[in-house]
Image (spheres, coloured by chain):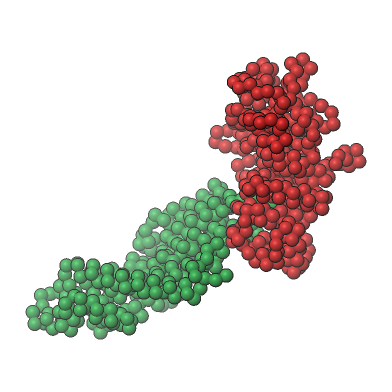
Amino acid sequence: MLQYTIRRLLAILVTLLVIATLTFVLMHCIPGGPFASEKELPPPILQNINARYHLDWPLWKQYFDYLAHLARWDLGPSFKYESMTVNDIINNGFPVSATLGGIALGIAVIFGITAGIIASMNQYKWQDNLVMFLATIGFSVPSFILASLFIFVFSYKLGWLPAALWGSPQQVIMPALALSALPTAFIARMVRSTMLEVLAQDYIRTAWAKGLSGGLVVYRHALKNALLPVFSYLGPLTAQILTGSFVVERIFAIPGMGRHFVTSIANRDYTTIMGVTIFYSIILLLANFLVDIAYAYLDPRIKVAGGKE
Amino acid sequence: MHKEEQKKPLLEVRGLKTSFFTYAGEVKAVDDVDFEVWPGEAVGIVGESGCGKSVTSLSIMRLIPKTGRITAGSILFNGVDLLKLSSREMQRIRGKEIAMIFQDPMTSLNPVLTIGYQLTESIRRHQRVSKREAREKAVEMLNLVGIPNPADRLSQYPHEFSGGMRQRVMIAMALSCNPKLLIADEPTTALDVTIQAQIIELLKDLRSRFSMSIILITHDLGVVAGLADRVVVMYGGKIVESGNIKDIYYRAKHPYTWGLLKSVPRLDAREKKRLVPITGQPPDLLEPPGGCAFNPRCRYAMRICLDRRPGFTDLGNGHKAACWLLHPEAPKRVLPVNEEEQPGHQGVG
């Protein structure tokens, strides 16, 4: 197990290096630069700025310089937000995004799994039809429409909830719901189909033949098998949802880090692009790693390579 | 083994009809089946795939898949009609009074639960025992079915067992609550031939030890010969012949039973004989042939076989068969086991 963990962590480091390199190369392939969009700067000033951010160095030197700083988790100063480092951006934005995302993730997992079980237990009955109808809506309505609708109904018309900003628990409700709609729908559909598949298995018939009650058959014998595929979806979902959503955070004016994934590219904010990309990659790789570990515990047929009995 | 005079049957299936409702129409998988199982008796239900033998057993357990329904009949177990019980009452019968083992031991155990859990689960469900007592009972059962080091194997998962060992676990699980009736649905079909023989030996041994009745469902007359006292032959959802094992093997009266007997390899054959397949396909139960369901494949079929379903003819000693050949006016045919086969002589008469 330890051996496996070490091996996986090394693999994660290698993957991160590849991602950093690719991002760096791609970023410099895009025409323009961090200060191209501003009003025409006099050449001496531009030279000074470039010198300050080492943009006058050859690319390979910039690259290795960046890696050296990255190794110390020094992501460098932001080109756009003066007096802010990329570390600051992540440190300020991530806790907000992660709180919101964590709540949305919880909603998606709890409601998605419950709805999926109910639907599968009542296949083709009204409960199933209702769940599938809601899931289709959750799937097909984009989050910005859902968010706008929530604001219109619950803030503008009913006045129950604050329309935007961050800080109080009431301000979490609408963005969390808007953010969780898609994953909830996805999980519900997934659980429904895997449950239906599992409920048709021979070992479920064995469980019935033992005289177990319906509850025991579902929770003891079916659920664990049915949730395994859901787990593998949780890795990417966690990374995506914890690092924030550009759209939802924009609409509710939430100071998370979601917007930086989009604005940093528009601004050619080189260090921010690199920083948030690498940060996202780390979360994604770690989440997948944790899912794999959990998998080995959940499914006894999977042996972690190098692990011992 | 017959105790008809003093005792009542343990299980009485009367006029059982089970149908599946598909988009194409009603499939009568079991159509008016009557049979009984006496205490301590082993009954083999024999037939091709799709003849309704598995559906019959699942009907007894009331474990028909959702698309199916028992449409008529009664299933009396110790005098109680199982079809009239609530699902909760039925749960108390399943696993405790009537236990079942299935065809494919590779898929019949839950892959994510330990063998120990799966064993103790049914023990604790039906008996008031502590966790420790259930564990001891589980070890005892595994020992009984011939699994070495049972105590160590309780914490293992099904994938750590071979197919034969898994079927032994299934048997241990089924017998852990001392059921009065064990339904074994093709228990050896998925196993190697050598393992098959072991499992049959084991069932034979356990049957006398637990003094239980067995319903053995199989398409293999060889397997039946090793275990059963009585045989019920099914075809197209109906019983075509039933009787004690000797009557079926030596004095079979139904052409379908003859066909089954001739398609089994025999060690005691005096000369080299080819196995003779039953030509054609099992009947389409959506549109069963008129008259006797076997008529399209029967080389002795007469005109009446196409029009009217034959009733049972009592041949004495509990042996009965449903075939027009047994009618007093029908031409006499004898069991063709020793008859020389003539190639090309297989057309419908």
- Is residue B286 visible in the rendered image? The answer is yes
Q: Residue at x 56, y 53 (%)?
A: A198
Residue at 28%, 78% in the rendered image: A67
Residue A210's x, y, as percent? 70, 54
Residue nearest the viewer, comparing B287 with A308: A308
Q: How many marks?
A: 0
Question: What colour denotes chain B?
Answer: red
> On the rendered structure, is B205 left or right of B299?
right
Chain A is which colour? green
Residue at image x 66%, y 48%? B194
Q: Would residue A155 be seen by someone viewing this image from the given angle?
A: no
Furthest residue toward left: A43
Q: Residue furthest right?
A: B6
Q: Position of residue A126 (x, y in %)?
A: 55, 49
Q: Looking at the picture, does residue B349 appear above or below residue B219?
A: above
Task: Please state which of residues B110 and B18 is positioned toward the viewer in this rendering.
Answer: B110
Figure check: B255 above or below A309: above
| Front position in the image: A4 or A237 | A4
Judged left or right of residue A184, residue B132 is right
Extreme-front residue of the structure: B271
**Position in image of residue A285 (x %, y %):** 40, 70
* Relative image position of residue A291 (x, y in whole percent): 47, 67
Q: Report which quarter residue A82 is drawn in.
A: bottom left
